[in-house]
Image (spheres, helix red, strand yellow):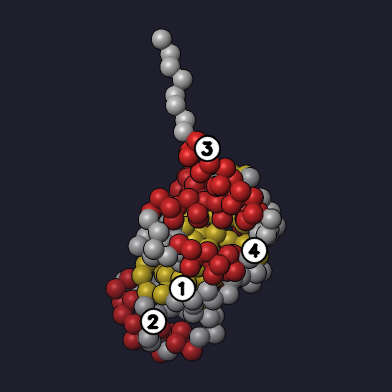
Amino acid sequence: MLEEPEVGADLIAADRALGRAVRARLSHGGAALDAQAIALRPTLTGLGAVERAVLKAVAGRILAAERLVAAAGPVAQLLVADRFGGAARIHPTAEAALKAAAVGLTLIDAEGLGPWWARLLARPDLAVVGALPDDPASGPRALLVGAGGVGPTGEDRTFWVSDSPASDARVLAALETAGLVAAPCASAGGLKLFMLTGYVQREDPRLDDPAVARLGRLSGVIGHAPVL
């Protein structure tokens, strides 16, 4: 015999309160990625992993309600579903995804699709504007690309490309000599992508330090991502 599950009034009241909170947040509309990060960060402080994930997902879905979010790569497809509720379109290649980024946002695998991120050096109209996962304890596996860029939020990552043939260890040592903290992010086709701690501007003089300049002939900042 089937029995109807018991649902207490407290659970119904809690769900209704959650619905009211989401409705109130939606009434404020979306926000730029950097502004959204600044507004959300104080609320995330001190929360558990599940609570943080839920709030990030709500913020992502609010963003996706106003801007198309596409994806390229198997990792990006999983991450875009978790954060934004799914992709408006799945692109077969990074090149196709970059074309779509001119009119929306596209999350692209950092590895496995070639050194697509190096193309951003020649695309001043596009930039990395986010990276997932974006919590401090995880390294990013997919980069969010969009038109323009994002400003500093107080806790950020900078993405820097180099064609240096040197080992990762040597590149990291050179960046450290210049006063920069870095970590490898991806490599393909003789090109390397590094993640720099903090918001490092394209014209930052530390990137012109002789120790960094002699690493290779082609290098540069391709964007930034808030850490949440």
Evaluate whether residue 36 shows in this view: yes
What residue is at 33 percent from the left and 71 percent from the top?
A: 168
Across and down, in percent, residue 39 comes to 55, 67
The alpha-carbon separation of the residues under discs 4 and 3 comes to 30 Å
Q: Could you tell which of marks 2 and 1 lies nearer the N-terminus?
A: 1
Task: Tell us which disc is closer to us: 3 or 1.
Answer: 3
Near-viewer residue (140 or 28) = 28
- The secondary structure type at the circle numbered 3 is helix
Q: Could you tell which of marks 4 and 2 lies nearer the N-terminus?
A: 4
The alpha-carbon separation of the residues under discs 2 and 1 comes to 15 Å
Residue on which the image places disc 3: 12
Task: Tell us which disc is closer to us: 2 or 1.
Answer: 1
Three-letter residue code for mark 2: Leu
Labelled pair 4, 2 in contact (Cβ < 8 Å): no
- The secondary structure type at the circle numbered 1 is loop
Three-letter residue code for mark 1: Glu
Labelled pair 2, 1 in contact (Cβ < 8 Å): no
Labelled pair 3, 2 in contact (Cβ < 8 Å): no
Task: Tell us which disc is closer to us: 4 or 2.
Answer: 4
Across and down, in percent, residue 149 comes to 61, 70
Residue on which the image places disc 1: 155
Q: Could you tell which of marks 3 and 2 lies nearer the N-terminus?
A: 3
Q: Could you tell which of marks 4 and 1 lies nearer the N-terminus?
A: 4
Three-letter residue code for mark 3: Ile
Count up the numbered dots.
4
Q: Local crowd at mark 1 within 10 Å, few (<14), some, or many (≥20)?
A: some
Residue on which the image places disc 4: 31
Q: Could you tell which of marks 3 and 1 lies nearer the N-terminus?
A: 3
Across and down, in percent, residue 20 comes to 61, 48
Q: Could you tell which of marks 4 and 3 lies nearer the N-terminus?
A: 3
- The secondary structure type at the circle numbered 2 is loop
| Residue 180: image tag | 2
